[in-house]
């Protein structure tokens, strides 16, 4: 199991990291809403390797059979490795190259709120919440946890679906007939 999990986890993680590095720096050019769609699409694409990893384990290491529990264990392990890559990549990007991300995101959020016709009091409340969140986001542990919860639910859902779809019980041998053959 270890070889399959590492192989597919590393490929999934590398794919998510590569896609993040290729797309996140350009989020301001396409707009935060479109960047969000691109980001989650790339997360889903990288987690497709969970399905292929479970299938590979079932077909190559488990004699063509796998229980839901074992399939889930393989899939969630791949997911965790991929999520770790995602978090590490974001931490490097954020703290070294994109430290203004929260300022840009906050400005976008406030502009959107003002455009929706929100009252000045509501805008001020949002400004205060964003300011507090930005302070918390400077803590690498908090930042990592928030970043981890972006891809993990998607990976969990894909793991559950893949484990359910790919589970395969052993073929049972037909019971011998109690009647003698004539």
Image: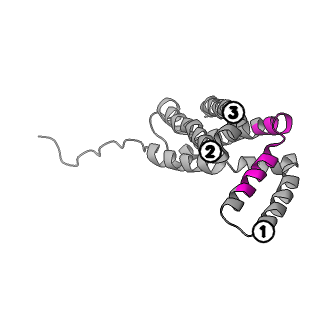
The reply to whether residue 81 is in sight is: no
Give the alpha-carbon distance from disc 1 to disc 2, as whole Å. Answer: 45 Å
- The residue segment tinted magenta is 90-111
Q: Quadrant of the C terminus?
A: top left
Label 1 vs 2, first from the N-terminus = 2
The chief SS type of the magenta part is helix
Residue 120's disc is 1
Quadrant in which residue 97 is drawn? top right
Q: Earlier in the sequence, mark 3 or mark 1?
A: 3
Q: Label 3, on which residue?
A: 17
- Residue depicted at 76% across the width and 39% down the height: 90
Nearer the observer, disc 3 or disc 2? 3
How many C-alpha atoms fall within 10 Å of the one at disc 1: few (<14), some, or many (≥20)? few
Do the residues bearing badges 3 and 1 touch, measured as CB atoms within 8 Å? no
Name above or below for residue 107 compared with residue 84: below
* Image coords of residue 106 (percent x, y): 78, 53
For label 2, count other residues whose C-alpha is less than 10 Å away and answer few (under 14), some (14-19) or many (20+).
Answer: many
Please tell me whether mark 1 or mark 2 is closer to you in this view: 1
Q: Is residue 23 left or right of residue 175?
A: right
Q: Is residue 118 visible?
A: yes
> What label sits on residue 76 in the rendered view?
2
Between 152 and 175, the residue placed more toward the observer is: 152
Of residues 38 and 18, the one nearer the viewer is: 38
Element on which disc 2 rests: helix
In the visual, does 147 lie left or right of 95?
left
Residue 122 image point, x, y percent: 76, 69
């Amino acid at each position: 199991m270890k070889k399959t999990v590492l192989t597919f986890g590393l490929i999934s993680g590398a794919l998510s990291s590569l896609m993040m590095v290729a797309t996140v720096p350009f989020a301001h050019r396409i707009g935060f809403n479109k960047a969000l769609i691109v980001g989650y699409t790339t997360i889903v694409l990288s987690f497709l390797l969970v399905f292929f990893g479970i299938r590979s384990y079932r077909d190559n290491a488990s004699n063509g059979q796998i229980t839901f529990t074992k399939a889930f264990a393989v899939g969630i392990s791949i997911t965790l490795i991929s999520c770790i890559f995602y978090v590490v990549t974001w931490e490097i990007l954020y703290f070294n190259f994109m430290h203004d991300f929260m300022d840009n995101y906050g400005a976008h959020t406030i502009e959107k709120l003002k455009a929706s016709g929100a009252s000045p009091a509501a805008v001020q409340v949002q400004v205060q919440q964003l300011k507090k969140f930005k302070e918390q986001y400077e803590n690498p542990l908090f930042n990592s946890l928030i970043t981890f919860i972006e891809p993990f639910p998607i990976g969990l859902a894909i793991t559950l679906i893949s484990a359910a779809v790919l589970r395969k019980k052993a073929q049972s041998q037909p019971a011998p007939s109690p009647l003698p053959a004539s």
